[in-house]
Amino acid sequence: MNHSSFIVKKEALVQELKNINKALGRKSKYNIQTVLELTITDNMLTLVVPGVKITIDCKTINTCKASIDFFYFKDIIDNTISKEIECIIRGNELQIGKTIFKVQTTFFENDSILRSIKLPINYTQWHVLQLEHKGYTLEELQFNNLEFVMYYAKKDLKKNILKAKEILGLYGVTFKEIEELVEKKIKI
């Protein structure tokens, strides 16, 4: 079974999680689903949420990538007593001290999803739709829990183009013309 781990000073990790939390703002219905991407590489832990990327020097064994609910992870770290935090990832489980919980996804096989998805903190459907044109793979979208966000963005786009066609059709504007205009804007 694949495994990876990192050991970091609790004080450093707590401070960086506080910085991320400041950027996200208070826990609310809008950010409760925020995914934290943990990337473990040689003596470095990278923490990524939309709009924020932080690296922390630490001791590591093997490399991997995992994603977990940000606020859940922060609560566990905040409530850990020891001065050093050891996180061990085995398969789909992350262990911190004696606490073991499921992580949303982990990655060990190859580097097809090693890129972090760059989105602003207050990203919109327009930002999400641009991801395909920036070359992100389905695996990368799935890893970052953006597959359904992309699906709904596409669905809403089609619905909104139909609404615009309904309004602008009186002036001879076609569905295809609106679709091409939006496609150009998304590719920017």
Image (cartoon, grey):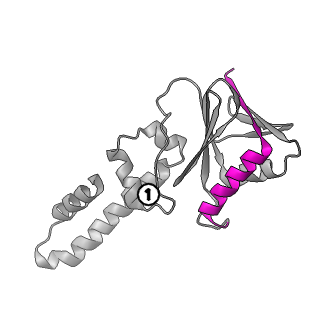
Identify whether 169 is placed above or below 27. below
* 63 sits to left or right of 148: right
Q: Point out the image quarter for the C terminus.
A: bottom left
Q: Which residue is drawn at 27% across and 68% down?
A: 162
The kind of secondary structure element at disc 1 is helix
Question: What's the amino acid at mark 1?
Answer: Tyr
* 87 sits to left or right of 173: right
Residue 13 seen by the camera: yes
Q: Residue furthest left?
A: 172
Q: Which residue lies furthest to the top in this view?
A: 1
Q: Does the magenta segment cover residue 36?
A: no
Residue toward you, 140 or 147? 140
Task: Locate residue 172, reporting x and y percent.
Answer: 10, 73
- What residue is shown with label 1? 152
What span is colored magenta in the figure? Answer: 1-26
Task: Locate residue 9, reporting x and y percent.
Answer: 78, 40
Q: Which residue is drawn at 37% across and 56% down?
A: 154
Dividing the picture into quadrants, the one containing residue 157 is bottom left
Q: Residue at x 79, y 44 (%)?
A: 10
Q: Point out the image quarter for the N terminus.
A: top right
Residue 50 seen by the camera: no
Label 1: how many Cα within 10 Å (few below 14, some 14–19, many 20+): some
Identify whether 167 is placed above or below 140. below
